[in-house]
Image (cartoon, rainbow, N blue to C red):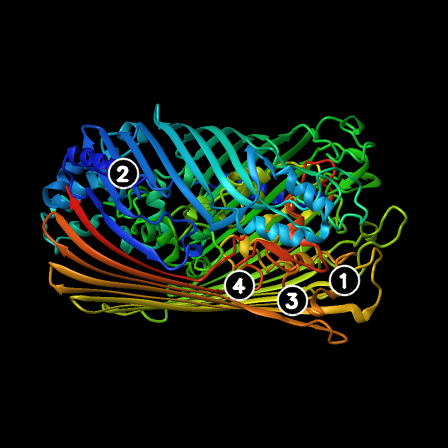
Amino acid sequence: MNARRVFGCVAALTALWSACAYAQNYATFGGQWWTQNANEAKYQEYRDVARGGFLESFLVRENIGKDAWTFWGANALQDDQQNHLTWARGIAWSADASFTQVPHRISNVTRTPYAEVKPGVFILPDSLQRLNQAVPGNYNNIMNDLLSGSREFPMSIRTDEARASVKMRPAAGWQFQVSGLQRHRSGYKPYGVPFGFNSAIELAEPIDQRVMEGDASLRFVHADYSVQAGFGMSDFTNGVSTLRWDNPKRLTDRTSPSAYTGGDGSALGQMDLYPDNQVVRGNVAFSARLPKATFFTATFGMSQGTQNDDWLPITVNTAIPTFRADSLPGKGTDAKLTRVTMDFRLTSHPMPKLSGTLRFNDVKDDNKTPEHTFASLVRMDQVAEPGPYTNKAFGHEYRTIGVDADYEVIPQASLGATYEWRERERTHREVEKDLENVFALRGRAMPLEDVIVSANWRHGNRELDEFLSEDYENASGVFIEQPLLRRYDVANRKQDAINANAMWALNEMVDLSLDFTSLKNDYPDSYFGLGKDEQNLVMAEATLHPTQVLDVSGGFGYGTTKTDQRSRQSSAGTLDTTKVNEWNANLKDKNVYGFAGCEWWAVPKKVTVSLDYVFTRAYGEYLLKGINNTAQSLPPTLYRMHDVQVETRYRLPKLELALRYGFEEFDVVDFANENVPLLGLTAGAATAIYLGDGTQDYKAHRVAVLASKHF
Amino acid sequence: MHRARWITVGLLASSVLVLAMARVPATTASPEAKYVGSDKCADCHEAQYKEWLTTSHGRADKEAALLGGQAGCESCHGPGSEHVAADGEKSNPGFGTLRKLAAMPATEANAVCSTCHRTGEQFYWDHSAHARKNVACIQCHQVHGSKSPKGMLKADSDSKTCFGCHKSKKFQTSKSAHMPVREGGMECTSCHNPHGTASPNMIRAAANNELCENCHADKRGPMLWEHAPVRENCVTCHDAHGANNQKVLQAKEPFICQRCHIATRHPSTLYDTPDLASNRLFNRSCTNCHSQVHGSNHPSGKFFLR
C-alpha cells in the first residue's frame, strides 16, 4: 500500500509540475511517522492516517483561452482522498467531476469465530455445534476457547462516491444541467443477529451497497420571472440482501423449549437486509419579480419510491414445518410511497424599512404499500407465534403556514416577528393529527460601530387533536401499552428556544464573540415517556493580533443537556399496573469544547511557528430512582480528547518546508461501549457473542516532514 | 384544514395580483454615465483585474450575450465613464459614482448579485432566512478572487464559512458521535443550501427523511414492517449535527427507546441492581436484538428482530 501511495504521489506531482505556472498552484507533500499505544481509533474514525509518503493537498488552476481548468484535492490515494476537476468554457459550458472516499473505521480489534463462505453466509464448525448441543453446560468454556483463538480483523466501511455534471447555457436566459452519481459503500459493520434475547450474537455484516442516480434540469431566466424543472432517478442495490449464520448452540433444528429467550431452537438463522429500492422524482418551480422588491415563488414536486424484493421464508427452522415459503400471502411487499410537495412564498418590501414573507409548505407522504396478513410469525427462528399479523403503511402530511415580518427601527436596530401554523396528520398512529402554533421574535442592533448584538426567541405550543387509545390495545381490547404513555414525537409539547449572539471588533487587533443557545421542551401531559428536555450552550471566541508577527485565536464552549423520563416496565407478558414498579431517569450531559491556536513569525517573512490545540470532553450521568428506591443510577460515562499540533514552517519564494509534530490522547469511560468482550455473560447461564469492537483509550504521536511547492 | 389552505392560497394569489397591477420600472443608474468595458478598469486596477479574470466572473466578461445584459466589472459596479473621466482625482464628483458593494446595505448589494444569480442554487434566495437576516452575499463570497477552489468563498471550505456564524453547530460537530464534517468528508452544504430552499431549515430536500436517505438509501424502503417514527422523521431519534451517544442518537440506548416503549416483557428490574453486562444495557443495548429498528422486509420482522 505504501509503495502504491509513494508511486501515486510521485506521478501526481509530476503531472502537477508539468502544468503551466499560475501563482496559486501548489502541492503539499511529505512523509509521516505515526505511532499509538493502542490499536484503536475512535477519533480517527473518518480519517486514513498517512504513514510514509503522502500528498496532503494540491491545487492547479489553469486558463487556456476560453477554457478554465481547476484540479484540486487532498489525501491523494488514501482512503479519505478527495479529487475534484472542473472545466469551464466561458460561461457557456462547464463540467465537474469528483471522486471522494470517506472511511468509517469502526474497530481495529474485532474478532469473530465465524467464517464467511460467501457474502452474507457465515458458518461455524459442525463439530462445535454438535458439542454445544450435546453438552450445553460446557458452552461458556468451549466458546471462550474458540473466541480467544479466533482471527482478529479491522472492521470498517468505506464510501466511494463519483459525481459528474455538465451545465450548458445554449442561449441567453437558458440553462441545462445533467448530473450523475455513483455511491458504493463496502466493508463490514457490526450487526445484531440474535437467536434469543438472552443469546445476542453479533456478526460482521458485509456491506456492498450501491446507489446510482441521474438528474436533469432545465432553467429559464427572464428579467421578470424564472422557471426551472427537474427530473431524476435513484436506484439502490444491496449486493448482500440476506444474512445466514449458524447457531453455535445447535446443530439440528428444534422448537425452542424456552420460548425465544434461550436461543437454542434453530440451527440456522436468516435475516433480510435492506431491500433494493428505486425512486423517480420531478419538480417544477416558478418565480416572479414584482414591484417594491417583491418576489413570488411556487414549487411543486413529486416523487415515488418503490420496493418489491422477494420475501424470505417465515423461518429457516425446519422443526416448524407449518410455515413454509408457500404459506406467505405473496411474493413481496410491493411497497410504494408517493411524496407530493407544494411550496408557495411571497416576500415583499412594501416600505423601505419593512419586509415580510408569507409562506405555505405542504409535504405529503402517501404510503400506498398494500396490507399483507400473515397467519403467524417466528421470532428469531425459535418458536411459531400464531397471528394474524398485518402490516401498516405509515403515511403523513405536514402543512405549515408562516408569516415573517422585519422592520428597521433605526439604521442601527431592527426587529422581527414570525408566526407559524403547523399541522401534522398521519395514519395508523395513536395521534393522527396535531397542531402547533409557533411565535418568534428577533432583534438585531449595532449599539456601537463595531458591535453587533442579536437575539431570537421562539415559543411553540403543540397540541394533539385526539388520542386514539385503541392503538395501544390488542385485538381483544386489552391494553398492551401503558395508557398514560405519550410518545414524544406526537405528545403535547411546549417548546421555548433562545439564541443570543454578540460580536465585537474591539479594534484592529481584537475580535470577540459570544453565543448562547437554549432549547427547552416540556411535555406536560406525558405521565410516561419523555417529560422534559433542556439543552443550553454558551460559546465564546476571540482572535487577537497583538503584533505584526503574532496571531492568536481561541474559543471555549460549555453545553449541558438534561432530560427527564418515566417508565414502568414488566418482565411479565401482561401490562404492569403496579405503581411501585415505576422508575424515573434524569440523564445529564455536560460538554466542554475548547480550542486555541497561534501563529508566530519567528523570523519575519521566513519562519513561522504555529500551535493548534483542541480539547473536547463529554460527561454523561444516568440518575435513576424508583418509588421504592429500587432503581439505581448507572455509572457515569466520559469521552475526552486532546489534540495538539505544532508546526514550524520555513518559507522560500516558491517553496515552503515544514516540520510538524502532533499528539492526540483519547480517554473513554463507558459501561456499555468500553472494552466490549467477546463473550458476554448475561442473566443465568445464557450468553452473548460480541465482536469486541468497543471503544478504547489511546495516545498517539505523529511526526511529519512536509514541502509545499508553489508553481 | 382545507379551508386554511385555500385561505392561504387566496391571500397569496391576491397579493400577487395587486402587486402586479402596481408594477413600476426598477430604478437604474444615472442616464449620463456610459459603460466603458473592463479593459479600461484594468488600466488602473491591474492586479485585481488579473485575479478576477481567473474567476467565473472574469470568464463571464466575454459572454455578455449569454447573460442577456452587461458583463464585466460594470455589471456590478455600474457604468464607469464618469469614474474614468475623473482620472483618479478623488475630489472629482465622478470618482465616487461607481457602486461599492461592501458599502451598500445588504439588500441592495444582494440585488446586484441577483441580477445574474437567480436560478439553480440561488433560486430561493429572496425568501431565505439569510436574506431575511440581512446577510450579504459578500459576507461569505469574494467577488474578485477566491480562497476556496469552488464557490468563490472567503474561507477555504464551505463548513469554515458557516462556522464563522453558526458556532453552536461547530460545537456539536466536536462531539464524539458526529458525521464526517470536521474531517472534511462532508460539508454543511452537503445537506443545507445557504441560499435558501423550499423546505424548512434550508435543507436540500423536501423533507428530513428524503435528505438523510440521499446517503442512507438502504433505509429508504418502504419496508414491509415499518417503525412509524422512522418513516416520519429521522431526527426524532438522531441529532444530525453531533451527539454524545453512538449513532448520533439523542440519548443513550436503552433510554432513547424507553421514551416510547414501556409495554411488557422488558424486565422492570433492569435498573434495580443494574447488571451492566446484560445485553439490555451493554454494547448496542436494545438493538443487540432489535437490529432492524429502521424497518424490516422479513415476514417475521414485525418486531424488527429479523
Residue A430, image x, y percentages: 77, 51
Nearer the observer: mark 4 or 1; the answer is 1
> Which one is earlier in the sequence, the residue at label 4 or at label 3?
4
Q: In which quarter of the image is residue B29?
A: top left
Nearer the observer: mark 1 or 2; the answer is 2
**A339 relative to A659, above or below:** above
Measured in 3D between alpha carbons, the distance from the residue under mark 4 to the one under mark 3, in whole angstroms, is 23 Å
Nearer the observer: mark 3 or 1; the answer is 1
Kindly indicate whether the residues beneath marks 4 and 1 are on one polypeptide chain: yes
Q: Badge 3 is on which residue?
A: A532
Q: What residue type is labelled 3?
A: Lys
> Which one is earlier in the sequence, the residue at label 2 or at label 4?
2
Q: In which quarter of the image is residue B42?
A: top left
- Residue B9 is tagged as none
> Which one is earlier in the sequence, the residue at label 3 or at label 2?
2
Kindly indicate whether the residues beneath marks 1 and 2 are on one polypeptide chain: yes
Q: Badge 2 is on which residue?
A: A3
Residue A296, image x, y percentages: 50, 41
Measured in 3D between alpha carbons, the distance from the residue under mark 3 to the one under mark 1, in whole angstroms, is 20 Å
Q: Badge 1 is on which residue?
A: A569
**B287 relative to A648, above or below:** above
Kindly indicate whether the residues beneath marks 3 and 2 are on one polypeptide chain: yes
> Which one is earlier in the sequence, the residue at label 1 or at label 2?
2
Q: Mark 1 lies on which chain?
A: A
Q: Badge 4 is on which residue?
A: A441
